Image (cartoon, helix red, strand yellow):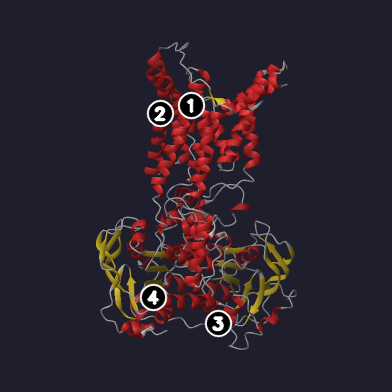
Amino acid sequence: MDRGAHRTVSDASEALALTGITHRFGAVTAIDDVSMTLRAGTVHALLGENGAGKSTLMRIAHGMIRPDAGQVAVNGTVRELASQGDAIAAGLGMVHQHFTLVPAMTVAENIALGGRGPWSQRAAERVVEELSARTGFALDPRAVVGSLPVGAQQRVEIAKALARRARVLVLDEPTGVLAPGEVQGLLRWLRAFVAQGNAAVLITHKLREALDVADDVTVLRRGARMMSGPAREASEQSLTAAMIGGAVERAPRSPRVPRHDAPVVFRADDLVVRDAGDVVRVRSASFRIAAGEIVGIAAVEGSGQRELLRALAGRLPVSSGTLVRPPAVGFVPEDRHGDAVLLERSLAENVALRGLGGARGVMHWDAVRARTRTLMADFDVRADGPDVRMRALSGGNQQKLVLARELEDGPGLARGAPPERQGEQDRTADHHRFVAPSVDSPPPTASALVVENPTRGLDVRATAAVHDRLREAADRGAAVVFHASDLDEVLLLASRVLVIFGGTVRETPLQRDAIGRAMVGFHS
Amino acid sequence: MSDVIAPFLAATVRTATPLALAALGELVVERAGIINIGLEGAILAGALGALLGGTAAGVAGGYVGATVAGTIVAAIFALFVVRWRADQIITGTALTLLSLGATGTLYRTLYGASGAALTLATSAPLPIPVLSSIPLVGAALFAQPPATYLAYLAVPVLAWWLHRTHAGLALRAIGERPDAADAAGVPVDRYRILAILFGGAMGGLAGGTLVLAQAGTFAEGMSSGRGFIAIAIVVLGRWRPVGVALGALLFGGASALQFAFQAMGWRVPYQLFLVTPYLLTLAALAGAVGRARAPAALGRSLDD
């Protein structure tokens, strides 16, 4: 990457200039007088925590939201962008975090969408083939988008923008859904794209990525610009400080090694799980998970981790093989708003949901409220009381309450002494000790928690708090199984990693490269 | 035998015509992800509009009145559902009930409480030369009022428009993923409004056909559930114009059976035939919904 070449051009023309942008949602000022300039031929990283206003700012640039104040200029011309159509016409293209593709349609149809006049499938297919050749993306014009893997869908999303002659691309958290190898491919492609005189804004919260690929960086915090300047003058420390304000101490990784006589909580032998469509998603998996362990499931989207977690949590039936699991497993699904909480109901009602399917008779609301208060105190859930609506809580506090609820009644809450910690030793070979189930000494209560993307949508502080709660639960003897799309999170939290690829589960050493390779099907 | 079959086929096509017109309109609405339960109301309004237009300006005026009346009902639906993001099912139900009441009241106010014995010039069958003299099916298919030919024409035109134009692609995308269409620069709400207005115009035309090509008069509640049957036909036809046309013919045939059975002198209670289309509606929905894939965003709140 010869990035120096662009930088020598100090008066590079402005591909996209945002000046004095301010936007309020009700009483909240989401964007506060932010300016930012994207130079032609460069990649500009837009950094910030969740909720810092990165996506809102770029939605304004793309005509999806009209700002209360400020102006947008594309290639030196001030534009009134009233719709995404206007933005597209001005030469902007956005690659959304949640792709805006029609899953039931083909690649060719998706790319033709938004044009005028008659069209034919064949002409649209030719356009896709031409784009494939131009970009190096191998796109099959006739493939139905919903059946493509996430990485390929992202390439369709990019191709869609390029088909409309976008010269300025905005990519919203594009690497979050990709496997490590794919990330490198995408960033390389991005450099080549801007080298042709185009420009790109890369929205991300990953510092390493920003420093690797960007020419300039802008950092937002709570809707305000904290810093802006050349990437080579920034460091991970300075960016972190700008992002969260003040110095941060990253909690050192503390891999916990459970006692070698810890009881086995989950035992799978030749486990096969099918999804609702009767497709095999987990293929003859065999593993043991013991009390006190935090096992990370690493996988790229759609590899079967969703079904594996649901089988462990008792939400999906076992098709064949055996799965021994505790009768009550706490489960925290990734779609918090869709699957875990009732946003419009009170905290107490949300707590009462646990085990409701097996409950009978009259509700004792006073007892539920008291329990909710206890959980809120134990897990540091900040809210006015058990009667406030779930919606009033921040994402972090919602997630803490969900964790509290799902861990209730197990040793996760029992006030026993944490299991003895072992020193750091040969962790990779450690799991063999668990093969023989210790039936002789049954656990006091075999408690278990299954968690899916536990920190999605949470900021740094809330993420740390959730991690701490999970570690505490394991310290108290719960078996914790979690999946995180972000490999860094898996490495940070897990004491052991299982990689699932195409339904096949493999134990993988705790090394970034090995896990990254296994996630895309290579293993040594 | 042909003295039974030819009239049966003619009755089938005649009964199927309003169903096909209404269902083709609703097809376009549903492809935009919206379900208009108010179609029944648009048909009824169309019937009254045909009466008003017909008495004022003859058959042509009747069709114009029918189309305008159906479009007005649809415009109210569009205003509530697209502009104000009201619930589709509740708005549609309210509109059907409103139409039922409003047409009855208007009719009685304009034509007196008795209201009976008001007859209107109907549009005469317009035989197409050569085609109408094909044995057996010629007269049934090609000696029909002009509205039937419009339905014939609408099927290939709509099929072409949906699958061979960018506008059709955009409409189908809106029914699947409105945010994807929006991101591609498609003016989503404008498409939805135009689709709803088109559906209303077609529904009104269907109501006009009941008055101008069949009954020759207006009766309160004369749509008698055809709007709901048309919605079932859209499902049965799998949201495709050709399928919808075939579905309309199936329902038309079920209704026409009673004429055939009478002609053959079979003594079957006529109520049995009156109920057939409705039983078929239930059977079609129970049997077809499982297999067919509806537009993914159908009926969803527009805010999602």
Q: Quadrant of residue B263?
A: top right
- Say what amino acid the circle numbered 4 marks: Val
- Say what amino acid the circle numbered 1 marks: Gly
Q: Earlier in the sequence, mark 1 or mark 2?
A: 2
State which chain disc 1 sits on: B
Residue that badge 2 annotates: B69
Residue that badge 4 annotates: A194
Q: Residue at x 46, y 76 (%)?
A: A189
Using the image, determine if residue B291 lies above or below residue B119: below
- Say what amino acid the circle numbered 2 marks: Ala
- The image shows residue A415 at horizontal and vertical percentages of 56, 72
- Say what amino acid the circle numbered 3 marks: Arg
Q: Are marks 2 and 4 in contact (CB under 8 Å)?
A: no
State which chain disc 4 sits on: A
Q: Quadrant of the N terminus of chain A?
A: bottom left
Residue that badge 3 annotates: A512
Distance from label 1 to label 2 (Cα)? 10 Å
Q: Is residue A461 left or right of residue A335?
A: left
- The image shows residue A43 at horizontal and vertical percentages of 37, 76
Distance from label 2 to label 4 (Cα)? 56 Å
Q: Quadrant of the C terminus of chain A?
A: bottom right
Distance from label 3 to label 1 (Cα)? 69 Å
Residue that badge 1 annotates: B207
